[in-house]
Amino acid sequence: MSEKTIFQKIADGEIPAKIEFQDEQCICIRDISPQAPLHLLVIPRRVIAHLSVAEQADAALLGHLLLVARDMALKLGFADGFRTVINNGPMAGETVPHLHVHVLGGRQMGWPPG
Ligand code: AMP
């Protein structure tokens, strides 16, 4: 069995994190190095390494992650604007090979992103 990802360890309670929400499919935590006043990560319990290897069978799970991201941003008071980001691969800045949705808000965002 391959080694657990850091996000699996968090989901399994082996590494502490500020968990804002969890259900049977995902966890939502505060990013340890926030890039905005709101910076959450929505992470599926089941490891999908990258969006590029997701399959059709993952469609409902991927949709669920986005809806949880939306719900959390609204619940925490960021209805005026929030951004969801999925980094895929090293050129996009992905550092943890366990798919996760960043949810950022609370400051004016620039475009294009860096
Ligand atoms: P990415 O670079 O898109 O793969 O995003 C990985 C994110 O995970 C980064 O924003 C990190 O700050 C965050 N991160 C890494 N380790 C932890 C941790 N132990 N708890 C919370 N967030 C973490």
Image (cartoon, rainbow, N blue to C red):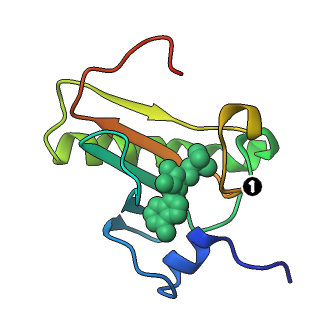
Image coordinates for residue 84, horizontal then vertical, percent: 44, 34
Residue at 18% x, 30% y: name it: 79
Q: Residue at x 38, y 73 (%)?
A: 17
Question: In front here: 35 or 42?
Answer: 35
Position of residue 85 in the picture relative to residue 97 (left or right):
left
Asked whether residue 56 is in view, the answer is yes
Indicate the amino acid at tag 1.
Answer: Ala
Residue at the extreme left of the image, as rendered = 77
Q: Quadrant of the C terminus?
A: top right
Answer with left or right where residue 21 lies relative to residue 107.
right
Residue shown at 62% from the left, 38% from the top: 87
Q: Neighbour class for label 1 at 10 Å: few (<14), some, many (≥20)?
A: some
Rendered view: 2 above or below 66: below
In terms of image quadrants, where is residue 53? top right
Kindly give the residue lying farthest to the top in the view shown.
111
Task: Specify the quadrant of the image occupied by residue 45.
Answer: bottom right
Q: Image quadrant for the N terminus?
A: bottom right
Vertical placement of 81 versus 46: above or below? above
Closest to the observer, 92 or 84: 92
Relative to residue 106, is residue 25 drawn left or right?
Answer: right
Q: Nearer the viewer, residue 27 or 64?
A: 27
Count of labels shown? 1
Q: Mark 1 points at which residue?
A: 49
